[in-house]
Image: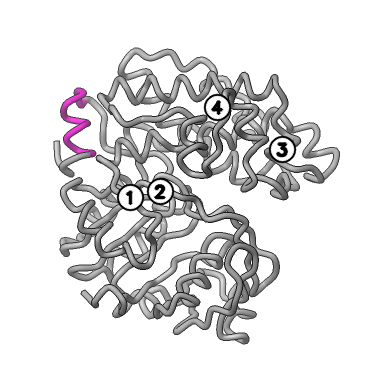
Amino acid sequence: MSPKNKLKFAIIGAGHGGKAMAAHLAIKGYEVNLYNRTFSKIEPIVKMKGIELEGEVAGFGKLNKISDNIKEVMEGTDVIMVVVPAYGHGSIAERCAPYLTDGQIVILNPGRTAGALEFLNIIRERGNKKKVIVAEAQTFIYASRGMGPATAKIFRIKQAIPIAAIPAIYTDQVIGLLDEAFPEFISGTSVIETSFNNMGAVFHPAITILNASRIEATMGNFQFYIEGVTPAVAKILEVVDKERVEVAHALKCKNVISAINWLSMAYNVIEDSLFDAIHSNPGYSGIMAPQTINVRYITEDVPMSLVPISEFGKAFGVDTTATDSLINLANIILKTDFRKAGRNFKRLGLENLNLEEIRNIFIEGRP
């Protein structure tokens, strides 16, 4: 492992978040490699040899290596930041498995719900027995957007992002190593905490589905959070949030927080209602709605966030009516069975296990 100030990073994914993270780390002076499976998407970055960053952090991030060859990008790096939608975690785990080596750290940014568990299961199934640490972030560190083929904008850097590893005993090691690069990262108690403090599950699907007609009529020409969250929408968000918290409590997660408290922690927004907190958050200002209903706010957050929350709710007798309603509406809108395609108990290897066995898997990496 390289010294802290000499850490070498591999960024997996050149979407909105991947470009922002790669450029930010490079501007900070770290050696950064960038991978994307489609070369045409990174070709402009190859030509520029880096990414122009604007917004809260501005400058040009010169990258060490930019490639569609994941082996080349991972080779010789210390920290592998996976910055792809959660539905891509499985395929990325399969591609990474042959090349992960002792001492490397993989962090999912974010894991959504049970992402680190799925990733770890897959690399083990593919025969990788190296001493690799797999961790996940509770949420993505930036509110960011790609502004062009080789340009990204960071609207806001969130203040405190819990990270947890499987097994949980490695979490402090990960945080200690990354404290210079990302002082915003803090230790989470376990992947249960990061999985169930997944705010994308609360905000993304509900706002998108409840604004479906507006998205289709305007092609997303409105501010997603500021205009898309009316008092009625906020009430539904509050119920979805309540169900998430109750499922986490059933799993004996003591550090689960409400959405309104999370907004206070991540953005320093202090209000009495979720509606007011969302509308007072400067980090949400200027973020436009998606141009289509077929967007990752549904295709990622429903199967990889809402489905596992619903699954745990059913297993432990927690009512998830609002969450289930959103899953059912998403299935109808996109003509997909997200329960079958998502992180159900079978996919996570949790079938027929009791509460303590499930907790042990999340915390210790074994039943």
Task: Give the number of the disc on residue 161.
Answer: 2
The answer, for residue 149, to whether it is visible in the render is yes
Instruction: Indicate which label's residue lies in the foreground, 4 or 2.
Output: 2
Secondary element at image label 2: strand
Q: How is the image coloured?
A: one colour
* Front-lying residue, 366 or 207: 207
- Dot 1 or dot 4, earlier in sequence: 1
- Dot 1 or dot 3, earlier in sequence: 1
What is the three-letter code of the residue carrying label 3? Ile
Q: Residue at x 58, y 79 (%)?
A: 60
Q: Are marks 2 and 1 in contact (CB under 8 Å)?
A: yes
What is the three-letter code of the residue carrying label 2? Ile
User: In the image, residue 364 lies at what x, y percent?
Assistant: 15, 42
Q: For mark 1, what is the residue?
A: 186
Residue sitting at the far right: 217
Q: For mark 3, what is the residue?
A: 226
Please provide the residue range marked out in magenta: 353-362
Crowd tier of the residue under label 3, counting other residues whose Cα lies within 10 Å: few below 14, some 14–19, many 20 or above: many
The answer to whether residue 97 is left or right of residue 307 is left
Q: CA distance from mark 1 to mark 4?
A: 31 Å
Instruction: Indicate which label's residue lies in the foreground, 4 or 3.
Output: 3
User: 91 above or below 248?
Assistant: below
Q: For mark 4, what is the residue?
A: 327
Residue 182, located in which quarter of the rendered image?
bottom left
